[in-house]
Image (tube, rainbow, N blue to C red):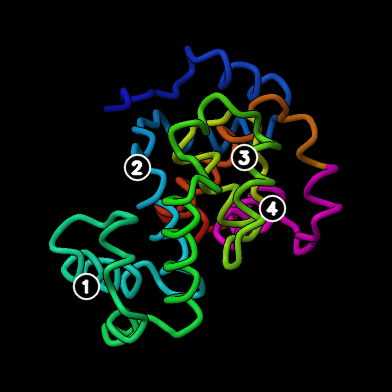
Amino acid sequence: MPKKIVLNMRTPAVKYLCQRDRRLAKVISMVGEISYTPYDDGFVFLVRQIVNQMLSNKVGAVLCGRLEGLCDGAVSPDAILKLEDDDIRGIGISRSKAGYIKNLAKASKEGIVCFDESPAMTDDEVFRSLTSLRGIGAWSAKMYLIFALDRQDVLPYEDAAFLQGYGWTYSTDDVSPASVKKRCRKWSPYASAAARYMYRALDSGLTKRKF
């Protein structure tokens, strides 16, 4: 079971970010302490990412719960491969997503993707391995790196929620990859921690008022 991790003003990553970026420092002070536990089942995490693509969190949670029910309470490669595509589609998951989920399960069973080996792999190795699979794009791979492997220097500029927090923080509508990467270069090597503050600012409603 992964241990709980705490980010606060005593954390080296937070100290570094506050020194490097005054606007981010203000966000950090507004958000306060963050605690989290990395997701400990990489396969289940990615299945959830596939299901949640282009859906609200509420709808995604409902569909993931239905899929878990189909798998008798435990989503795993074996359980998924026992299902027919029509079984998965029958709970409201699209044909394409059903295929992506089955493909991920097959890749896991065949060792094409080995979640047990991911912690020893570099970020680039994990990214290339995952994005080689149909249905796993840059967004899903980066979410896996941040939230399952707890990698420290991942900038999720493909993620709409992150971009909302970013746009609010810097009072800008320019959220192009080039602009975000340029402005956030100073976050390295702790871009993931900065991203967590963007997400938390959005989730806590801070972005509803002017920065």
In the foreground, 104 or 170: 104
| Amino acid under disc 3 | Val
Q: Earlier in the sequence, mark 3 or mark 4?
A: 3
| Amino acid under disc 4 | Tyr
The Cα atoms of the two marked residues, 3 and 4, are separated by: 18 Å
| Amino acid under disc 1 | Arg
Residue 68, horizontal then vertical, whole percent: 21, 64
Disc number at residue 66?
1
Residue 36, horizontal then vertical, whole percent: 36, 33
What kind of element bears circle 1? helix
Q: Is residue 136 above or below residue 143?
A: below
| Amino acid under disc 2 | Asp
Q: Residue 87: name its quadrant.
A: bottom left
Give the extent of the magenta segment.
157-182
Q: Residue at x 51, y 28 (%)?
A: 119
Q: Which residue is mark 4?
A: 157
The Cα atoms of the two marked residues, 1 and 3, are separated by: 29 Å
Q: Is residue 39 magenta?
A: no
Q: Is residue 33 above or below residue 147?
A: above
**Label total for image:** 4
